[in-house]
Amino acid sequence: MDITAETAADLLARLCAEGHGLSARRDGAMIDLGECGLRITVDAPRMQDNGLVVQLPIGVGHPRWSGEFAWDQAVGIGGRDRHPVADALDGWVHNVLPVFAAIALPDSDLAERAWTARFHDGTRAMDVHYGPATIRDFGGLTEEFHQAVADRPPTMAVVEELFTGYALPDRPIWLFTFCARMPGGPITEVTLLNSDIGTRFGHIADHLPWQGHGTVKSWALAVPR
């Protein structure tokens, strides 16, 4: 089956509508989630490893960030009964979309999957919505590791440093992190407002009790109050 951007967007719209009761109207590769203001756009899937792995670019737009889209590279791994694009879409809806639903669809079941941390330093305040982390265990990751990720995902470690040491814009900002421990060594990627800033934050997963090989990816949306 040839999966195009439009095909993937159609699958995503049906997942939002049928799986979560959202108003989802598709026009080509764009999905409009109705009066909440959220729009989702999907780019062409990029298949790898003989079609077993896919990278699927997905962007979220909202009037509060003036026509920009918050882009992610959703990754899907195919199984015996599941296409990798379906895996990528399912993971994105349940682990990324909740942080945007928290501000635009607060009564939805997706918003219930996000948590909110409130930051205040006396002069500025922001709410940080963050979703469940995606963990891929390639062997050896423990329950202690999973709990440590839930308690303080790497993305929140970045937010803490941004809030205490940087001048932040007076607008919503989005970020995600990808951290891994592989046989070849550690990998840390940090993306803020679609820009790579990972060279400054190579330490943000050091607090996790890595005892094996695997990856952690987590999202956050920081909204000034």
Image (spheres, grey):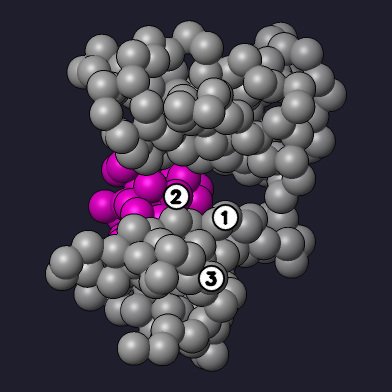
Any mark on residue 97, and which?
Answer: none
Residue drawn at x 57%, y 30% as measured from the top left: 187
Residue 162 forms part of the magenta stretch: no
Q: Earlier in the sequence, mark 1 or mark 3?
A: 3
- Name the residue beneath numbered marker 2: 96
Lower position in the chain sequence, tag 3 or tag 2: 3
**What is the crowding at mark 2: few (fewer than 14 residues within 10 Å), some, or many (at least 20)?**
many
Report the span colored magenta.
Answer: 87-115
Mark 1 lies on residue = 72
Residue 177 shows in this picture? yes
Q: Which residue is mark 3?
A: 46
Kind of residue at badge 1: Asp
User: Which image quarter: residue 155?
Assistant: top right
Please state the horizontal and vertical placement of residue 101, each as a whole percent of the image: 43, 53
Secondary structure at numbered mark 2: loop
Are there few (<14), some (14-19), or many (20+) residues within 10 Å of tag 1? Answer: many
Which amino acid does the dot numbered 3 rest on?
Arg
Quadrant that contains the C terminus: top right
